[in-house]
Amino acid sequence: MSRKFFIGGNWKMNGDVAFVKSHVNFINDTEIPANTEVVIAPPYIYLDSVRKHLKKEVGVSAQNSYTKSSGAYTGEISPEQLKDLGIEWVILGHSERREIFKESDEFVGEKVAHALATGVKVIACVGEKLEEREANLTEEVVFRQLRAIADRIKDWTHVVIAYEPVWAIGTGKVATPTQAQQVHIALRDWLRNNVSAHVADHTRIIYGGSVNGKNCRDLSSEGDIDGFLVGGACLKPEFSDIVRTKAHL
Ligand SMILES: O=C[C@H](O)COP(=O)(O)O
């Protein structure tokens, strides 16, 4: 089953006007392999500028969006507003949103449903914490997070699932290719058993957590790892190596 390799670059709350300019030039100068889709996710305030100056073959994503179209929701941004700027993607359910901002599985599911209904594609994140992995709860946690999404959407065409073990995010402690592959297989089987064989076969499941220019090749050799959601390394020159993980195939 061929699924186009997907590389997301999540800037998180990093960057400034000068960085936007240099990073956009850097991405514009990076040759994107034909077998790879690249999407970068700057902070909200830079989305418009990035979208206007970035080459069109690279997608732009927000890092969050709300469940409503407009209204008295101070500090929130709607998928409709993202669409208005030509922003094609949004990251939802990132563990930093779940942990620091106390977003529940249900809330994430509602946000995914609203973004998709608006026509904004979604990178939906799931992942277990270290204590959950150590208690053998990895599958229970990621299945629960996925269930809250699956209960609210019908069409998975515009969903990419990002498996991001919390213990691997920003820690330099990357999951081994085997560890990641095991969870990706479990997620794909869950989709097969709970949604459909078609969705299981076609939905891209990407890995996030301390991916860098050195470990990306090994991780990508696993059959169910369809790309990466990159944090820290997406801000560095090595991001072009990650973007080009599959360039020589
Ligand atoms: O969204 C990206 C992930 O949280 C991974 O971050 P990281 O590459 O800095 O570990």
Image (spheres, grey):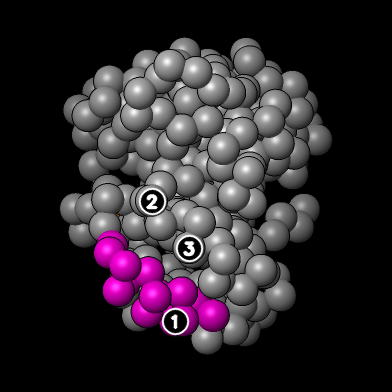
Mark nearer the N terminus (3 vs 1): 1
For badge 3, the amino acid type reads: Ser
| Residue 12 percent coordinates (x, y) | 32, 51
How far, Cα to Cα, is label 1 from label 2? 20 Å
Residue extent of the magenta highlight:
15-28
Quadrant housing residue 128:
top left
Relative to residue 175, is residue 94 depicted above or below? above
Density class for disc 3 (Cα within 10 Å; few <14, some 14-19, many ≥20) is some
Whether the residues at callouts 1 and 2 have beta carbons within 8 Å, the answer is no
| Residue 42 percent coordinates (x, y) | 40, 56
Which residue is disc 1 drawn over?
Answer: 26
Relative to residue 247, is residue 129 depicted above or below? above
Which residue is disc 3 drawn over?
Answer: 49
Q: For the residue labelled by badge 3, is the local secondary structure a helix, a strand or a loop?
A: helix
Relative to residue 185, is residue 3 depicted above or below? below
Residue nearer the viewer, 73 or 5: 73
Q: For the residue labelled by badge 2, is the local secondary structure a helix, a strand or a loop?
A: helix
Relative to residue 243, is residue 37 depicted above or below? above
Which residue is disc 2 drawn over?
Answer: 45
Residue nearer the viewer, 29 or 223: 29
Quadrant housing residue 17:
bottom left
Residue nearer the viewer, 79 or 111: 79
For badge 2, the amino acid type reads: Ile
